[in-house]
Image (cartoon, helix red, strand yellow):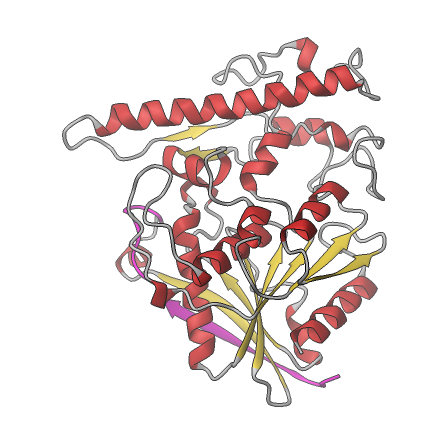
Amino acid sequence: MAGSVKLESVTIDVAPGAAHESQSGLQSMRPRIWGALARPDTPTRTCAVVVHPTSNFMGHYLLEPLARRGVAALGLNTRYLGNDAMLVLERAIQDVGAGVTWLRRQGFERVILIGNSGGGALVSLYQAQAERLTLTETPAGDPVDLDAGDLPPADGIALCAAHLGRSHLLKMWADPAVIDEADLLATDPALDMFNEVNGPPYSPEFLRAYRAAQVERVSGLERWCRARLRQLRACPDGPRDLPFVVHRTLADPRTLDPAIDPNDREIGTTVWGEPYAQNFAANSMGRFTSLTGFLSQWAPCSRGHGPANLALTSVPVLLAEHTADSSVFPPDNEEWTRAAAGRVSTIRLEKGTHYLAGQPHLVAELADAIAGFSR
């Protein structure tokens, strides 16, 4: 294992996107992304990239452990850092490509993409398009002008606590008891998972109705987005987008009923806290969005379904299952495994939570596995 680690700040220019993707005038004039590179004290030609659509991974828990094991590690941010509202996945993969291109220019011969949490679906979409570019526009119909030269393929993918994609999350987490998208409190008690009459435990009949209503709610939001876009863009010199709020987006019965997709998770909590409070919180998953952002990341039409994209790739895959994860469940890991059949190796981090917070022994175990995989 290597000794000291050198940390470097990385700044990478990227292609401009749509207007107002950032509220910073300077960032709009000269769009850039930032990262933190951890180098081992011995020369290496291998680098891992840890990236997420919107989270700041410059301080990711894997950077220094990987570097101490002889693998350089880049914690990379996209241009949508902290900005779910405007996120367009088709543009975000361009930022991943800029990071991979920069690493190749630094002399790294082997690049491993680490998809942690929401990063799993992002790196899968990236690698699929890097191997065969097919995207020309966003689900909203806006051109993205991707070039194959901007998307150099990586050499492997490691998935850690990787959910299937934001559209899948919203389908499983959106509160179907909402009866008025403009009213936070308007509720159908028959579809309310927090109504003790319904459970927990939840009956199979309730869950079937619940899941079907979740699909209909999210599909209805997609239809509304498309109708509003047509209306806006039919106006001469009209606006190209519209911000809006999606209430109550953290209502998954699995947080209260251990019998559904059982694993080692703590019941009565989400990755961010108590389910009822998080469901109604002013700032929760997918709360603030826009028509174009919703269609690209949250809607059923999103191209960001991880396993579907992973199946289109050809590189080796490492899948790390965190057995106490409260947002990634055994069926999710099974779907990832099927998508990479014949080229996937798996490890189980026993009692590992989503973020491995306070579990340094599991961080070390994961870093060992990724370092071995990269070689």
Q: Residue at x 50, y 67 (%)?
A: 35
**In the displayed image of the protein, which residue is found farthest to the left?**
236
In the image, taking residue 139 as reference, residue 205 lies left or right, namely: right
* Picture quarter with the N terminus: bottom right
Q: Quadrant of residue 115?
A: bottom right
Q: Is residue 306 something that shows in the picture? A: yes
Q: Position of residue 367 (x, y in %)?
A: 73, 69
Q: Residue at x 60, y 18 (%)?
A: 213
In the image, taking residue 204 as reference, residue 248 lies left or right, namely: left
- Above or below residue 230? Residue 355 is below
- Above or below residue 95? Residue 181 is above
**In the displayed image of the protein, which residue is found farthest to the bottom?**
42
In the image, taking residue 198 as reference, residue 287 lies left or right, namely: left
Q: Which residues are magenta?
A: 1-21
* Picture quarter with the C terminus: bottom right
- Above or below residue 123? Residue 271 is above
Q: Position of residue 171 (x, y in %)?
A: 59, 31
In the image, taking residue 35 as reference, residue 269 lies left or right, namely: right
In front here: 104 or 189? Answer: 104
Q: Position of residue 144 (x, y in %)?
A: 31, 50
In front here: 251 or 166? Answer: 166
Q: Residue at x 33, y 45 (%)?
A: 137
Asked if residue 209 is among those painted magenta in the image, a careful observer would answer no
**In the displayed image of the protein, which residue is found farthest to the front?**
342
Q: Is residue 65 something that shows in the picture? A: no
Q: Position of residue 199 (x, y in %)?
A: 81, 18
Q: Quadrant of residue 155?
A: bottom right
- Above or below residue 123? Residue 268 is above
Q: Residue at x 54, y 59 (%)?
A: 313
